[in-house]
Amino acid sequence: MGGAGSTSSGGASALAGGAAGDSEASNPGIAGGLSGVGGSTAGDDGSADGAAPVADAAPDGSPPVSGTLRLLFVDSEGGQSTVLQLPNAQVLVIDTGNPGMRDGERMLAVLQGELGATEIDYLLTTHYDSDHVGGVPYLAARLGIGQFLDHGATNAPASYLALANAGTRRSLAVGDALELGGVSLDVVSAAGAVIDAPRSGGGLPNPFCEGAQAELPGDAVDENVNSVGVVIRFGRFDFLDLGDLLWPREHELACPNNLVGSIDLYLTTHHGLTRSGAPQLVRAIQPLAAIMNNGPRKGGGGSTWNTLALAPGGENVWQVHRAVAAPAAQNAPPDQIANLDEGQADAANFLEVQVESSGEFRIINPRTSFSKSYTSR
């Protein structure tokens, strides 16, 4: 792993190690690393205020982008719930965590408390496992939802379909490209399929395919395989979220050619569980930084950590939770972990990413005010 960007620190605390990895059996991982790129730290308070810098034209020659993109990764205890404030101030939510008040109130604290949102303009549900779709009824009872995006009706809970079908709903397919609030969204997986042609910047032969596992023996195909995977683009910045896409589909995206291309920020697939995170994909996309939406005892450690950070360290991995059963060497530095504790001591902190139209992006841990800055490729 190369050097990370400039840093701003405050309130670091010691990290206590555990004894073992996550509860799923570990699979052989290829040692890989994330490459940090230096850039100046954009302030020290985590705010998005201030004039946006002059933007460059997008790589495809389209008009310059402007504004700030914010991504906030909510603690849903190893579920998924990501809130994006788009450059035009609209709100895109990707998944809503588990059913009930706990995750629902955490989402509302970000949506209303941090962003002042009165509605969700776009709600993308990657797939229908309860830790991704469970919070929809709770949020829909409290905020308006403009458009529902999903992979189709197969396996959808009746409660979700009733809400989505009563509103504006669109089922996404591989190859779809959407323009939402100043960002572009490319669908690279959906409904059990993945793209078979490279997206812009992808398609190069992947040297990490040699000897790579195409699938995990004995691992069942379930609803996770239907995950909507997206690349969100803002100028030069690329963010990859594959939901809980399973290893065999990741292999198809990666081999023999890397269809996704390089990525600036990667949300670890499937919460950092070893059913996903195929090294041949993770290494090929060469993320500058990764965020792991794990729980205290779900995801992280073991071969997942090795894939992300074994060479030579974890400087550019950020975690929503410390993996309490993994040793300190298989966790990010404490300043890059939103939540160090579990149970009653768990403060449900989030991580934030701010992306400027210039291509600079900054990852912030509001718990400590620590941040690192990176420059998009």
Image (spheres, rainbow, N blue to C red):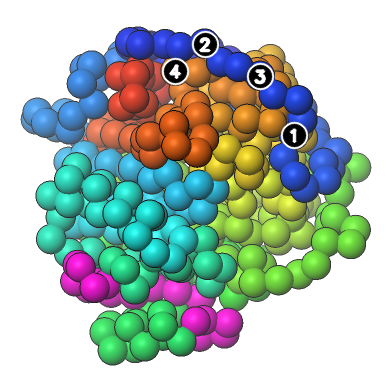
Residue 5 showing in the rendered view: yes
Marks 1/3: CA distance? 11 Å
Q: Secondary structure at mark 3?
A: loop
Marks 1/4: CA distance? 21 Å
Q: Amino acid at mark 4?
A: Asp
122 and 100: which is toward the camera: 100
Q: How far across and how far down the image is residue 204, in percent?
A: 67, 45
Query: Does the magenta segment cover residue 286?
Result: no
Mark 3 — residue? 17
| N-term-proximal mark, 4 vs 3 | 3
Mark 4 — residue? 335
Residue 359 showing in the rendered view: no
Residues at discs 3 and 2 in contact (Cβ within 8 Å): no
| N-term-proximal mark, 2 vs 1 | 2
Q: How far across and how far down the image is residue 46, in percent?
A: 23, 26
Q: Kindly identify which numbered label has been placed on residue 14.
A: 2
